[in-house]
Image: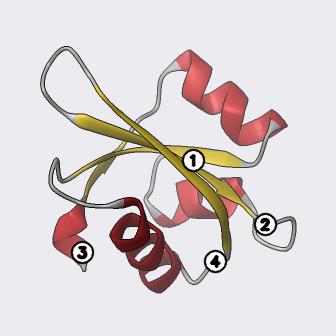
């Protein structure tokens, strides 16, 4: 499961989404489906996922926007990954 998640994106926009919309932004394996991404995030960070949106970047990476349910905080995930 851990190999699905490559890294956390910490741009200005990603931080704003984390604070305002309880959404984390990740670079994930390009072959991962939304269901696989959801399960990997829930298992890795012990949170509840509400929605997963993905798209492929110009650099041929898959970026996923993971909206968490209200009982789970995106800032907690950031602190677990050591960026906040």
**Which labelled disc corresponds to residue 2?**
3
Residue depicted at 78% across the width and 66% down the height: 69
Badge 4 crowding class, 10 Å Cα cut-off, few under 14, some 14 to 19, many 20 or more, is many
Q: Residue drawn 31% across and 61% down?
A: 33
> Which sits earlier in the primary sequence, circle 2 or circle 3?
3
Q: Nearer the viewer, residue 22 or 65?
A: 65
* Mark 1 → mark 3, Cα distance in angstroms: 16 Å
**Mark 2 → mark 1, Cα distance in angstroms:** 12 Å
Task: Residue under label 1, please give it.
Answer: 24
Apparent side of residue 51 relative to residue 59 in the rendered image (left or right): right
The residue closer to the viewer here, 78 or 32, is: 32
| Residue that label 4 marks | 47
Q: Position of residue 82 (x, y in %)?
A: 45, 56
Sequence-first disc among 4 and 3: 3
At a point 68% along the width and 53% down the height, the residue shown is: 75
Q: Are marks 2 and 3 in contact (CB under 8 Å)?
A: no
Q: Whole-Å distance between the Cαs marked 4 and 2? A: 8 Å
**N-terminal-most mark, 1 or 4:** 1
Marks 4 and 3, how far apart at CA: 15 Å
Q: Is residue 55 above or below residue 8?
A: above
Q: Is residue 81 left or right of residue 84?
A: left
Label 1 sits on a secondary structure element that is strand
Judge by depth and name the residue closer to the eye, 39 or 82.
39
Residue that appears at 57% across and 29% down: 14
Q: How far apart are labels 2 and 3 at the CA level? A: 21 Å
Q: Is 63 rendered above or below residue 6?
A: above
Left or right of 11? Residue 70 is right
Question: Earlier along the polypeptide chain: callout 2 or callout 1?
Answer: 1
The earlier-in-sequence mark between 4 and 2 is 4
Residue 51 lies, in percent from the top left, at 64, 57
Q: Contact, CB < 8 Å: mark 4 with mark 2? A: yes
């Amino acid at each position: 499961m851990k190999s699905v998640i490559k890294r956390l994106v910490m741009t200005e926009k990603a931080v704003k989404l984390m604070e305002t919309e309880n959404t984390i932004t990740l670079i994930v394996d390009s072959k991962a489906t939304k269901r696989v991404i959801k399960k990997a995030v829930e298992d890795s960070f012990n949170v509840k996922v509400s929605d997963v949106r993905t798209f492929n970047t110009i650099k041929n990476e898959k970026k996923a926007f993971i909206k968490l349910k209200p009982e789970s905080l995106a800032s907690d995930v950031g602190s677990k990954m050591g960026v906040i």
